[in-house]
Amino acid sequence: MDASQRYRLSNGVEIPCIGYGTAPLNEAIGQEMPVGIDEALVCGYRLIDTAWAYKNEAYLGAAIRRSGIDRKELFVTSKCSNRFRGYEQALACFKESLDLLRLEYLDLYLIHWPAKDGPPEQWQKLNSETWRALETLYKDGYVRAIGVSNFWPHHLEPLMEHAEIPPMVLQLEYHPGYIQAEPVAFARAHGMIVEGWSPLGTGKLLNNETLLEIGKNYNKSPAQVILNWCVNTGVIPLPKSHNEARILQNIDIFDFKMSEDDMSTLSNMEYIGGSGWTPDSITW
């Protein structure tokens, strides 16, 4: 594998095997991202993941224009915010994102988090109405693929029961110690490609002794070991960093292959660090 390899979604659209995540790293939402996005594009990232909630879509759009990269080479993802659930609201959120990005279309649009408050018939209907908006955007040619983020099977099953177009991507938190085996298996059984946000466990895995030792075997950092493990488990990692050296390091992961024992060690680690967020605990 190398950074140019792409997976084929269920509708035939191709998606890069690694991406650059732009979720805020601190409270300065949007303020530091221009440097990171520019550097990521220079280093060869072609999948860039953002969201309305990240407040950096205008920066991303400007970085794309500065880069001079052919739009067809890029795979731009954004997400419908929790504040815009429902059919008309989701369409309005998408329009605002597209206007901020100053793009004619998105490659992938996701529902950021599932609705889950109230009786099941209430939140299930709200998720279905939001999904119907994504189907409209897809059919009208404004997005090349649609999917969901942070949905578990009990959110996906009722949505898919009423969906005209099934989700093509499931994005969720994924890293050693938190592989979310049930949602990943469900997604794959239903033809979805899986993307992993926070693949480095919000940075808490980078000083882990086990990962440091494995990294020494390949002359690689713990981050590179983790990201190599991600792509070799068939999950698209979305690492994020503002540090230029680390941005480059995070895509330099295709020149080594870990042993089956080392892969198994990463796949069976106990929980060490992560966001602590789950779909049923998010209230914003």
Image (cartoon, grey):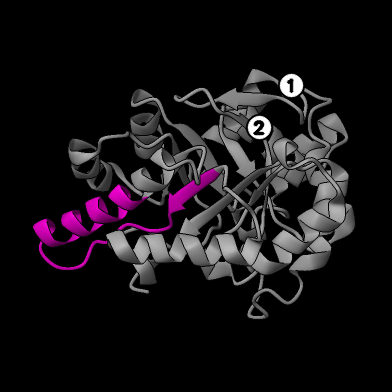
Judging from the image, what secondary structure is the residue with disc 2 in?
loop
Where is residue 20? Give x, y as percent. Answer: 70, 49
Give the quarter of the image for residue 269. Answer: top right
| Image quadrant containing the C terminus | bottom left
* Left/right of residue 204 with respect to residue 120 in the rendered view: right
- Residue at the spot x=84%, y=25% of the render? 255
- Label 2 crowding class (10 Å Cα cut-off): few <14, some 14-19, many 20+? many
- Residue at the spot x=24%, y=54% of the render? 129
Task: From this view, report whether residue 244 is shown above or below residue 17.
Answer: below
Mark 2, residue position: 17
Asked if the stretch drawn in magenta spans residue 231, the answer is: no
Q: Nearer the viewer, residue 93 or 248?
A: 93
- Residue at the spot x=68%, y=80% of the render? 28
Mark 1, residue position: 1
Under mark 2, the amino acid is Cys
Q: Nearer the viewer, residue 148 or 253?
A: 148
Q: CA distance from mark 2 to mark 1?
A: 9 Å
Precedes in sequence: disc 2 or disc 1: 1
* Left/right of residue 227 with respect to residue 152 in the rendered view: right
Q: Nearer the viewer, residue 215 or 65?
A: 65
* Left/right of residue 240 with respect to residue 149 in the rendered view: right
| Image quadrant containing the N terminus | top right
Start-end of magenta stretch = 108-133
